[in-house]
Amino acid sequence: MSKLRNTTRRTFLTQTTGALAGSMVAFSIVPSAVIGANGQTAPSDKIITGSIGIGGRGAAFVRPGMTAAICDVDENHLRAASERLQGQADSYKDYRELLDRKDIDAVFIASPDHWHGLMTVHACEAGKDVYVEKPASKTIEEGKAMIEAARRYGRIVQVGSQGRSTDAAYKACQYIRNGNLGTVSKVTCWHYENPKGDWTPDSSPPPELDWDKWLGPARWMPYNPNKVHFNFRWLLDFGGGQIRDRGAHVMSVAMWCMNADHTGPVSVEATGEPPHEGIWDCPCTMEVKYEFKNPDWTMTWSQPGEKLLDAAFGAKYWGDKDTLIVTGGDGGCGTEEKAMKYAVPAGGIEVFKSPGHIENWMDCIKTREKPLMDIEAGVQVANLCILGNISYRLGRKLEWDPANQYVKRDEEANRWLAFIGRGPWHL
């Protein structure tokens, strides 16, 4: 068992300040495999990865020849992944043991949302580059800690909003940023409703699942099959509904197209219809309005909104010259033909074209440049989702200070920006 990394947020911030003031070496410490030391292969030839959370989406990151270690609290997931890798990777139930491996350069984190922040911070502390699934963070304070950890330890952290790496999003971004819509005053996002659950009774967890470790930093509650694995998305304690699941994709593309990665809204107002049955507590329908300043524009998230181009979800960009529809937001983005056929004129704005989301991350591990969906941009998008849910839960508009990251004149709302964690599982 590896030593517990029990870094509190106060200690972390103190250490960060001291490290920056006293030594710049922290930014040059990388795994020996990165520089090809001790006879190891440098990343120009091979990057060795570990995967934390290998069920569902995480299974896509388990790759023969690249994955040296896998971690999950469900033995069924471990068994399936091990078979795919033909036993060529070590299995762990405790992610800290995987992070202690000196031969691993980088990790994929595809755990449930409530684990993303803590695992990413610990991975950065361990000197690993990170690909963490969206949404980046569960709370505002988690997001701050993730950014601080990435910068302090000089880590490359890519958030898995892969829509930015699709050809359609790239074309739409170039089309919008080159002024073809004129001044864009609003972006309207649509998505279908959150599902309604049932009253499946609580029970003992199955023997293959370590329920206590699955809960981790979240508050303790009894096991229920409608709370775990894919279904965690529909509980505010773990996921946060469609706005955090697909919203993190749709709004990622929107923030990129609007060149707004380093900004935030000045107000957030959400309404929604709570479920009237079942154990899931995310609102079935939801409407959220975000107001941005300098430049002035608004974004709305609607469940359901007006369905366009027969797509289940997407966004429409409204300019004073024209409009543009971008469907999807994840790996299945689409856009209108006028954007797909657009060629940037001489002297126009050339947007970075990703070779693929994982490929972009791998390239940046070698060059040490920021990836397309760097942790700072990923946290800004996650903050939109977090604030929308807080406004819904409190039933009122929030006046947000994007520079200082707090709700103005609302101490109750500010208490929702962080959570303490459970037992040893806290920042």
Image (spheres, rainbow, N blue to C red):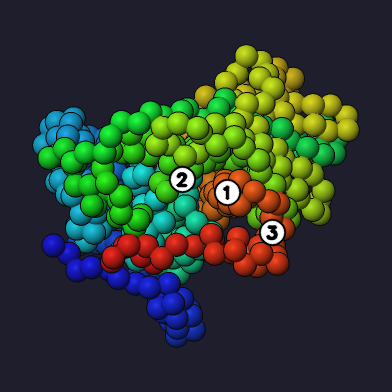
| Location of residue 307 in the rendering, given as x and y in whole percent from the top left corner | 66, 19
The first of marks 3 and 2 along the sequence is 2
| Residue on which disc 1 sits | 393
Residue at x 75% of width, y 31% of height: 317
Disc 3 or disc 2, which is closer to the eye?
2
Q: Quadrant of the N terminus?
A: bottom left
Query: Amino acid type of disc 1?
Result: Arg
Could you say which is closer to the camera, residue 60 or residue 406? 406
The first of marks 1 and 2 along the sequence is 2
Disc 1 or disc 2, which is closer to the eye?
1
Quarter-wise, where is residue 178 in the image? top right
Q: Are marks 3 and 2 in contact (CB under 8 Å)?
A: no
- Label 1 CA crowd tier, 10 Å (few <14, some 14–19, many 20+): some
| Location of residue 176 in the rendering, given as x and y in whole percent from the top left corner | 75, 34
Left or right of 215, for residue 165:
right
| Location of residue 401 in the rendering, given as x and y in whole percent from the top left corner | 69, 62
Q: Does 60 sit above or below residue 390?
A: above
Q: Are marks 3 and 1 in contact (CB under 8 Å)?
A: no
The first of marks 3 and 1 along the sequence is 1
Residue at x 41% of width, y 32% of height: 278
Residue at x 71% of width, y 42% of height: 289
What residue occupies the far right of the structure in this picture? 320
What residue occupies the far top of the structure in this picture? 310
Left or right of 40, for residue 338:
right
The tag on residue 400 is: 3
Could you say which is closer to the camera, residue 307 or residue 215? 215
Quarter-wise, where is residue 253 in the image? top right
| Residue on which disc 2 sits | 236
Asked whether residue 254 is in view, the answer is no
Query: Amino acid type of disc 3?
Result: Trp
| Location of residue 186 in the rendering, given as x and y in whole percent from the top left corner | 78, 37
